[in-house]
Image (cartoon, helix red, strand yellow):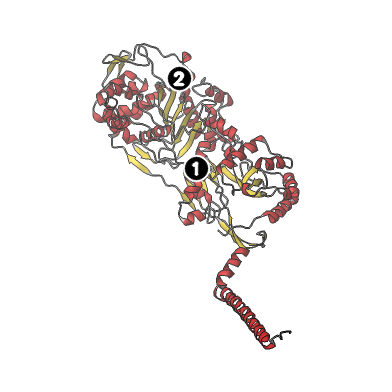
Amino acid sequence: MTELRNVEQDLSRFRARVLAASLAVLVCFLLLVSRLVWLQVFRHQEFAEQAENNRIAIVPIVPNRGLILDRNGIVLASNYSAYTLEITPSRVDRALDTVVDDLEKVIEITPRDRRRFKKLLEESKSVDSIPVRTKLTDEEVAKFAAQRFRFPGVDIKARLFRSYPWGELASHVIGYIGRINQAEKEQIEEWPEDEQANYRGTEYIGKLGVEASFESTLHGVTGVEQVETSAGGRAVRRLGSSPATPGNTVKLSIDIKLQKLIEDLYGDRRGALVAIAPKTGEILAFVSKPTFDPNLFVDGIDTENWQALNESIDKPLLNRALRGTYPPGSTYKPYMALIALETGKRTPQQTINDPGYFWFGNHQFRDDKVGGHGVVDMYKSIVASCDTYYFMLANDLGVDTIHDYMDKFGFGELTGIDIAGESKGLLPSTAWKRAAYRKPEQQKWYAGETISLGIGQGYNNFTILQLASAVSMLAHDGVRMKPHLVSDITDITTKENRHIEPQVISKLDVKPENLAFVKKAMVGVNVEGTSASAFKGAPYSSGGKTGTAQVVGIAQGSKYNASQVDERHRDHALFIAYAPADDPKIAVALVVENAGFGAANAAPIARRAIDYWLLGQYPSEEDIAAVQKGQATAPIGTPRNASDVPLAPKGGPGGATGVPALPASAAAVAAVAAVESAARPMAQTR
């Protein structure tokens, strides 16, 4: 018998199911509505801001770096624009070496480009854009634009480059810029937030010289650009911008033509020279030889060139004027004489008999003149450069008295010059030796160690900058000015010029008659003394002192013979001078390493530098060649008018005027615009 279905029960069950489903749908709908209300009402502002931020990217605009000029307005460092081919390692789709190999089939990439790229790669993060080739031509830009689709992670970018139009000339003064390395990035992260913001987008920073010490002045103020982007992060259009403010112009006190003359006079020899205006402290020339080409560092130096510079036995990267330290030799004697007068240990008339040596205990300290100078008073001791006189004087004064007086001239102290990296040198004392050594027998100062201090040997070691500062102090009647390389800073926006005012560091508390006597003796050096031949015929009066400093010791009883000594173990040639004697306009200190006598190899360079500054004379080509070989004392040939001697730039794509080198053809510009439009990734909000 067939069982009948309960229709009412089935309908009731169906209605319950429909009701449950309807309730479920209603709950879901209410949830959706509530979520929509939450998102659209309560969080509307937050998501609107996020959407706007995704639509608009803030891109930094790197400012033009400020110019560096010499005292006459000649451009020493400028900027030029060029296109670079850059790789972002994190965005490439194959091995980097393969990418570079493929790129080389489109654009020339030299072995030097590869070495530089690898060096930069080691110093950078994978998200950094690293140049593999710089300074692309119009044709190369167009070629890559046509092949851009094959190289994800590779882009062409317009970059500003630094140009040093004079190449190696004054490179230690000007310095150079280079890519910010990882250590520098970590330092920047510790800066205040506003200073960090000013370096967003910046990839280069001053590394050396004026470029480094005046980084904040030269850098400028970073601008910003608002760019609308597509959903894929591509730039669509520019919405607005706040332009960058270029860096300020820095004018140096050096005369680049004088600098070139001095560097040419050194030739292939090593050494340093500093010329100062005694009354202001302005540096007129700041020479360190050998030099280097700062343009090598602008877009990243390759390993081969870096090794050549860094491992060279001549140390071209060493700023000898600032960091090199040398025994002052006999240039120390005028200061020793002044100490003797001030302490009453000697009078100008007091004499000694010089047999050519001085015995201390069982050690004989020999004068450079065999047989000695005979009867010697203080004037003759300076003019003839009598070692025996100063052996005896040092013994009578003692090391600490020498230290306490020499300290007043700035020996063994930082001069405070306005570029970083200065060496203090070494002015010995008993206290210094106790602190410098650990063993008690090494800490003790022995009386015999004092003797050689009198002729600028022993532990004495000073920079050429310190020697120049000290002689300018003598010339300026005991007033020591702070040496400085920067004379003016000009605001690029307001054109307001700020002159660096001369600053007095200290004044020597000595009797005027004692100072006048020493200066008179220094004038005698250039008239009838060791450097008389170099200053023969000079139409101005000058003071000077020659010096010859031993590099290695000579055994007792042995005789020094330069021809039998390794070239780098030969004596250094030194000289200090100022002129005119009665109203000094220039003071000079220099060293020619391993060149021998200061009178023959250093004084002639100083004479030409002073002639240039006071007389406007430039030596003949014949004279320059003779000085380079140490074969001329007084000038030979007919000097030229300095203003008639041309000064042609050596290096730097921007030339002396820093003219931009950006490709100018419409095809190249259009090609780059297309590449950048298609390839620019979504910029992060900064």
Residue under pointer 1: 210
Question: Horizontally, is 433 left or right of 588 in the view?
Answer: left
The residue pinned by badge 2 equals: 570
At label 1, which amino acid type do we have? Val
- The residue positioned 64% from the left and 79% from the top of the image is 21
Which residue is more in the foreground, 317 or 602? 317
3D distance between C-alphas at marks 1 and 2 = 33 Å
Please indicate whether residue 468 sits to the left or right of residue 83 in the image. left
Res. 179 visible in picture: yes
Amino acid type of disc 2? Arg
Q: Earlier in the sequence, mark 1 or mark 2?
A: 1
x, y (%) of residue 146? 76, 49
For image coordinates 36% across by 24% down, the residue present is 457
Q: Residue extending furthest front?
A: 1
Residue 443 placement, left or right of 127: left
Q: Residue at x 68, y 84 (%)?
A: 10
Q: Report which quarter residue 330 is drawn in.
A: top left
Please, is residue 549 above or below residue 83 in the view?
Answer: above
* 10 Å crowding of disc 2: few (<14), some (14-19), many (20+): many
Residue 593 in the image: state x and y as whole percent. Answer: 47, 25
Q: How many marks?
A: 2
Report which quarter residue 337 is drawn in.
top left
Q: Label 1's element?
A: helix
Name the quadrant of the C terminus: bottom right
Q: Secondary structure at mark 2?
A: loop
Disc 1 packing (10 Å; few <14; some 14–19; many ≥20): many
